[in-house]
Amino acid sequence: MTGASVALLAGTVSTILFASSVLPMVIKALRTRDLESYSPANLVLANVGNAVHSIYVVHLPAGPIWALHGFYVVTSALMLLWWLRFRPLRRGVVPTASLENERSLA
């Protein structure tokens, strides 16, 4: 095996491992719509970092790094969008659906 093929194999394996580690978090966030534990500052910084890192990645030859970076760009953007979409508007405000359920139980 040449050095380039070892590097390609390592890049492919690490891409699969990193994506596999993030995917359960993304699936849970989509399923539960509960992103309260996520820091908005972290989500914004991750997206800004991905945007800056894209300048570097697009100048590399196509390979596992493109797949991994693409995965990070998509998942980071989704998590930020979901955080914005599913967050409570104000703390202490009970969603309407919960109020309707409480009324039907009374």
Image (cartoon, rainbow, N blue to C red):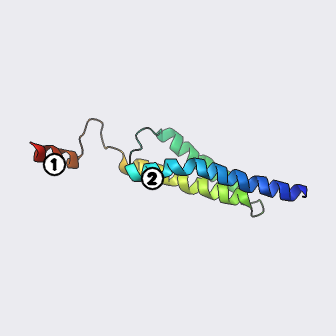
Q: Nearer the viewer, mark 1 or mark 2?
A: 1
Considering the numbered disc 2 on the image, is that residue within a helix, a strand or a loop? helix
Report which quarter residue 92 is drawn in: top left
Report which quarter residue 8 is drawn in: bottom right
Q: Residue at x 30, y 36 (%)?
A: 91
The alpha-carbon separation of the residues under discs 1 and 2 comes to 27 Å
Q: Position of residue 83 (x, y in %)?
A: 42, 47
Return the residue found at the far left: 106
Q: Is residue 91 visible?
A: yes
Q: Is residue 17 above or below residue 66?
A: above
Q: Residue at x 86, y 58 (%)?
A: 4
Return the residue found at the far front: 1
User: Of the numbered discs in the image, which one, if any, rests on residue 64?
Assistant: none
Q: Disc 1 marks which residue?
A: 100
Q: Position of residue 95 (x, y in %)?
A: 24, 45
Q: Position of residue 13 (x, y in %)?
A: 72, 53
Left or right: residue 95 compared with residue 64: left
Q: Residue at x 56, y 48 (%)?
A: 22
The three-letter code of the residue at mark 2 reads Leu
Q: Disc 2 marks which residue?
A: 81
Q: Position of residue 26 (x, y in %)?
A: 49, 51
The three-letter code of the residue at mark 1 reads Glu
- Within 10 Å of disc 1 (Cα), the crowding (few <14, some 14-19, many 20+) is few
Q: Where the C terminus falls, by quadrant?
A: top left
